[in-house]
Image: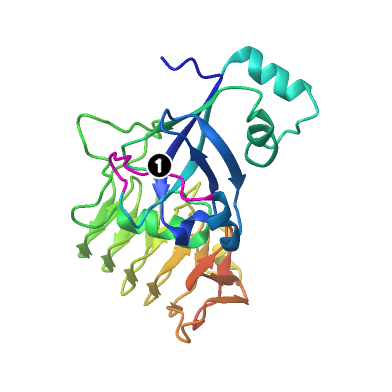
Amino acid sequence: DRRADITIAAQPVGIEDASAMGIFRFDRGGQIVAFEEKPKRDRLDEIGRSIPAGATFAGHTPDRPFMASMGIYVFSRDVLVDLLSGDGGTDFGKEIIPCALGRYRVNSYLFRGYWADVGTIASFYDANVMLTQPGAPFTFYDPRRPIYTHPRFLPAARFADCAIRGAIVAEGCYLDRCTVEQSIVGIRTNVQNGSTIRRSVLLGADFYEADDDATVRGEHPRLGIGREVVLDRVIVDKNARIGDGARLVNERGVDEADGDGYYIRNGVVIVPKDGVIRAGTHV
């Protein structure tokens, strides 16, 4: 209804997040008058507080004075063709949107629902673990806003004498005499007996592995989480193998490190896709 050529979905953020996002300033009519992608902290004051004095809306608090792009854009077709065919570049945040200001009417749309930027390890981890908390701001189980995924035709998850507290466990998993707390357990995950998983995100596996598979007979641990393993604040990517007795808890409390089969970023231990953690490894 404002006849915008370009509309950018947006939410307010605090100063601690602003430098990782596209920040803009708009006038009281919602038209964007300045935009900068991932400005350095010392640039934020120059860009200015994004929200006009007196403006109020859902999600706006005094400690969230900067308006951030959600990376969702709606273009008029002719405007998009013109911008892409010119010399304005191809990166939306760094080139196209700044180039469009002054040439076209660029407006903001204030999104009032839940949204989280997951562009860093810390934000990805926090957004996932948050889903396991009581009273989380987002849930998969709201009948008014159902979330669908493609069918995989896997059996239901099976638990054999386990202690599960505040966890989301996907289909096709087999958990044997283990403890899972405040964690996400992805499809086809196999957790063997005596293991403890706390505040972790396991992305699961793309396939099942038979006991007589060649990789099992070899030196690698079997697919999934072995016996007597402890995971705390860990992201385990798909098809990873974690051997018996491994302990991944960031014992030294470091913020960043690289190790044999793992990384630490933002204090979170990461086992990459197809990664292998040898039996008895302590991190």
User: Which quadrant is home to the N terminus?
Assistant: top left
The furthest residue to the bottom: 252
Q: Nearer the viewer, residue 108 or 224?
A: 108
Along the viewing direction, whichever of 175 and 235 lies nearer the viewer: 235
Q: Is residue 125 above or below residue 276?
A: above
Percent of width and height locating residue 195: 34, 73
In this rendering, would 120 be left or right of 139? right
Label 1 crowd (10 A; few <14 / some 14-19 / many >=20): some
Magenta stretch bounds? 48-60
Q: Is residue 8 left or right of residue 187?
A: right
Q: Quadrant of residue 39?
A: bottom right
The residue that appears at 20% across and 65% down in the rendered structure is 161
- At 21% across and 29% down in the image, what residue appears? 144
Residue 219, position as x, y percentages in the image = 60, 72
Q: Is residue 34 left or right of residue 115?
A: right
- Magenta region includes residue 116: no
> Relative to residue 264, is residue 79 depicted above or below?
above
**172 or 258: nearer the eye?**
258
Q: Residue furthest front?
A: 53
Q: Position of residue 100 (x, y in %)?
A: 65, 28
Q: Tag 1, which secondary structure?
A: loop
Which residue was labeled with disc 1? 52
Looking at the image, what colour scheme do you see?
Answer: rainbow
In the image, residue 56 lies in the stretch drawn in magenta: yes
Q: Which amino acid type is shown beneath numbered disc 1?
A: Pro
Predominant SS along the magenta part: loop
In percent of the image, x 35 and y 46: which residue is there? 172
Where residue 151 sits, quadrant-wise, is: top left
Q: Quadrant of residue 262?
A: bottom right
